[in-house]
Image: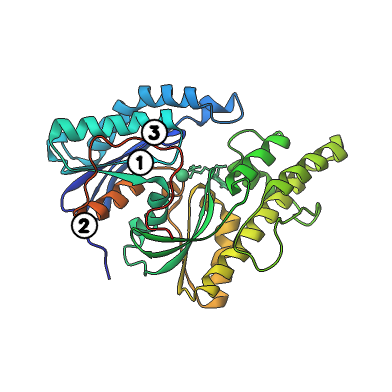
Amino acid sequence: MTIPHFPGPVLGIETSCDETSAAVVENGRVLSNIVSSQTDLHAQWGGVVPEAAARAHVEAILPVLVSALDRAGVAKEEVRAVAATNRPGLVGALSVGLTAAKTFAHMQRLPFVAVHHLEGHLLSVLADHPEAPFPHVALVVSGGHTELVEVVAPGDYRLLGQTLDDAAGEAFDKSARLLGLGYPGGRAIQEAARAGDAGRYPLPRGLSGDTLDFSFSGLKTAVLRLVEREGSRLRTADAAASIQEAIVGVLAERATRAAERFEATCLTLVGGVAANEALRERLKGRCERLGLRFLTPSFDLCTDNAAMIALAGSIRLARGERTSLDVDVFSNAPLPGSA
Ligand code: KG4
Ligand code: ZN
């Protein structure tokens, strides 16, 4: 079954954290997806500084929007609807994108829909796999989230498990900082781990037992102790490989457990940490052995982007959903339809 999309070009805008992004999709096809990343700006502080993020979004939003229309070959008069992330995220950052989207919709007299950021990640697989089966189980792993979700249908999500403390991306980022590998840490750990021995430093895996939840705070403490204990003797590549193995191992084990428990035929891997090659390979292998279909977006649709927001918006708009231009931003919000 293919999912109905809104007819005509839909403009999407995403500014929930440190990426300013605008995209155009048409009938489920991504025509453009422009992402301006603030990573270099925040690297000097070793993490995202909310006020600096908001200011950088203000500077980037118009050029990014214009590039998205240009790249898509769509004039602003040809856009038929607008979608933007309004929750969850940094309120100052979200406000910039939401205000730009509302202004565009108001000026062009277009229908508008507000999108939950995680719904964007969950539906990002549809860009490359419009035939993705529903229901399926999704592992959403990003800098702010680590969740197992039953995706009953677009718009109908059930939370199966989540982290009780740090997100998986945060565990990568904080560990990388302790190893002196810089920010953002996920890719840096992946690169350093290539030459490393994952068995050298045993690290904790968080919760044990038959759970679908996660805990990464013990890992962070263990990495701190390891760095203090080993001092200049620390083998950075081995430490990176051991950290990556601790995170990837637990994510892969729990995601396949959830898929089996809910008798899913398909498992998806989405969010910024889904760009991790070791995690993609591990889940692909486990799913093959279990006879499960495994889907994950292309790399540029894993980290934050507006194409996933435009896609999610296009599905909601096709069902006749509209959001009033009075809508606000929210730093926290449950997934739509989650029980
Ligand atoms: O989805 P995303 O762009 O932003 C949030 O919604 O949080 O995810 C960003 C996170 C960061 O923590 C970053 O370190 C992580 O994704 N990440 C990776 C990789 N690329 C990005 N983690 C592990 N391996 C990677 N290759
Ligand atoms: Zn995200």
**CB of mark 1 near ligand 2 (< 8 Å):** no
**Residue 208, percent from left and from top:** 71, 63
| Quadrant in which the C terminus is drawn | bottom left
Instruction: Say the numbered circle drawn on residue 94.
Output: 3
| Quadrant in which the N terminus is drawn | bottom left
Callout 3 amino acid = Leu
Mark 3 to mark 1 CA distance (whole Å): 7 Å
| CB contact under 8 Å: marks 3 and 2 | no
Res 162 seen here: yes
N-terminal of the pair, mark 1 or mark 2, is 1
| CB contact under 8 Å: marks 3 and 1 | yes
Callout 1 amino acid = Thr
N-terminal of the pair, mark 3 or mark 2, is 3
N-terminal of the pair, mark 3 or mark 1, is 1
Query: For numbered disc 2, what is the local secondary structure?
Result: loop
Q: Quadrant of residue 224?
A: top right
Q: Where is mark 1, residue-wise?
A: 85
Q: Where is mark 2, residue-wise?
A: 319
Query: Left of 306 or right of it: where is 233?
Result: right
Query: Left of 93 or right of it: where is 193?
Result: right
Mark 3 to mark 2 CA distance (whole Å): 25 Å
Instruction: From the viewer's side, name the closer residue of 208 and 191.
Output: 208
Res 195 seen here: no
Residue in view at x 15 percent, y 36 percent = 75
Residue in view at x 15 percent, y 30 percent = 107
